[in-house]
C-alpha cells in the first residue's frame, strides 16, 4: 500500500539547512532537506515527529548518533533490502557502492544498489550519505554533495576519522 499524503509534518533547522519531517500516526515516512529555507510546509506535528526532531537535534549537537524511530518508506523489496543494509553501517564508517553490493550478495548489482541508495527518503536516519564511490570519491547525494561532505566531515570529527576516503 502506497501512502500518498502524510497528515503530520514538522520542520527542523540544522547547520546544513532545513529538514522537513513527514509522518503518519505510526511512522516517519520522509525526512528531507529543502534548499529554500524560506520554503515552508504546513506544520502539524505529532509525538513521532517530535521524537524525530529530538533525535536529529541530538545528532547535530553531537550527543547521540543512533536513531530509534518507527520508520516506513515505500519501495521495492530490493530497495528495502538496500535501505536495511544502510542502517547497519555504523556512525563514523563509510562504504563504497561496490562493497555495499557485495554485502548484499552480488557485486554486479552496484548500479541497482546506487539507484536504491539514491531513492532513500529518510535522510540521515537511514545513512545513505555514508556510501561513497570507489577509492573514496565523493559521489551523488539527493540533497547535494556539500551536505554529504558536511555530514562525513561531522561524523569524522566525532570519531577522529576522515570519512570521505578509505
Image: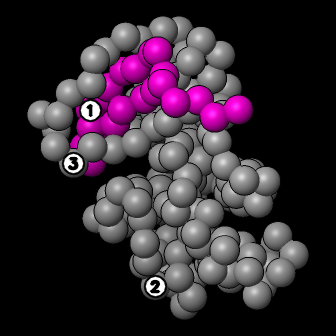
Residue 138 position by quadrant = bottom left
Q: Which residue is mark 3?
A: 35
Q: In the displayed structure, would residue 160 be above or below residue 140? A: above
Residue 11 located within the stretch drawn in magenta: yes
Span shown in magenta: 1-22
Nearest-to-viewer mark from 3 and 1: 3
Does residue 71 appear left or right of residue 138 in this picture?
right
Q: In the displayed structure, would residue 150 be above or below residue 1? A: below
Q: Quadrant of the C terminus?
A: bottom right
Q: How much space separates mark 3 and mark 1, taking CA atoms? A: 12 Å
- Secondary structure found at label 3: loop
Q: Which residue is mark 2?
A: 137
Report if residue 58 is visible in the image: no
Name the residue at 63% across, 23% down. 27
Residue 13's label in the rendered image is 1
Residue 154 position by quadrant = bottom left
| Dot 1 alpha-carbon crowd within 10 angstroms: few under 14, some 14 to 19, many 20 or more | few
Name the residue at 34% across, 36% down. 19
Report if residue 123 is visible in the image: yes
Depth order, front residue of 155/132 = 132
Name the residue at 26% across, 32% down. 13
Report if the CB atoms under discs 3 and 2 are less than 8 Å apart: no
Q: Position of residue 65 (x, y in %)?
A: 56, 41
First in residue order: circle 3 vs circle 1: 1
Does residue 75 appear left or right of residue 10 in this picture?
right
Depth order, front residue of 108/3 = 3
Q: How much space separates mark 3 and mark 2, taking CA atoms? A: 24 Å
Q: In the displayed structure, would residue 118 be above or below residue 87? A: below
Q: Residue furthest left?
A: 38
Depth order, front residue of 92/4 = 4
Residue 14 located within the stretch drawn in magenta: yes
Q: Position of residue 38 (x, y in %)?
A: 12, 34
Amino acid at each position: 500500500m502506497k501512502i500518498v499524503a502524510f497528515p503530520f509534518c514538522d520542520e527542523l533547522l540544522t547547520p546544513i539547512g532545513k529538514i522537513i519531517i513527514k509522518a503518519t500516526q505510526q511512522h516517519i515516512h520522509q525526512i528531507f532537506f529543502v534548499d529554500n529555507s524560506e520554503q515552508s510546509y504546513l506544520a502539524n506535528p505529532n509525538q513521532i515527529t517530535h521524537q524525530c526532531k529530538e533525535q536529529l537535534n541530538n545528532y547535530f549537537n553531537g550527543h547521540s548518533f543512533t536513531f530509534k524511530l518507527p520508520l516506513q518508506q515505500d519501495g521495492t523489496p530490493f530497495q528495502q533490502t538496500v535501505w536495511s543494509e544502510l542502517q547497519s553501517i555504523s556512525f563514523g564508517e563509510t562504504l563504497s557502492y561496490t562493497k555495499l553490493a557485495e554485502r548484499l550478495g552480488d557485486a554486479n548489482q552496484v548500479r541497482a544498489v546506487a539507484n536504491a541508495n539514491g531513492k532513500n527518503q529518510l535522510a540521515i536516519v537511514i545513512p545513505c550519505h555514508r556510501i561513497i564511490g570507489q577509492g573514496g570519491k565523493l559521489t551523488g547525494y539527493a540533497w547535494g554533495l556539500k551536505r554529504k561532505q558536511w555530514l562525513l566531515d561531522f561524523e569524522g570529527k566525532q570519531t577522529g576519522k576522515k570519512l570521505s576516503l578509505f
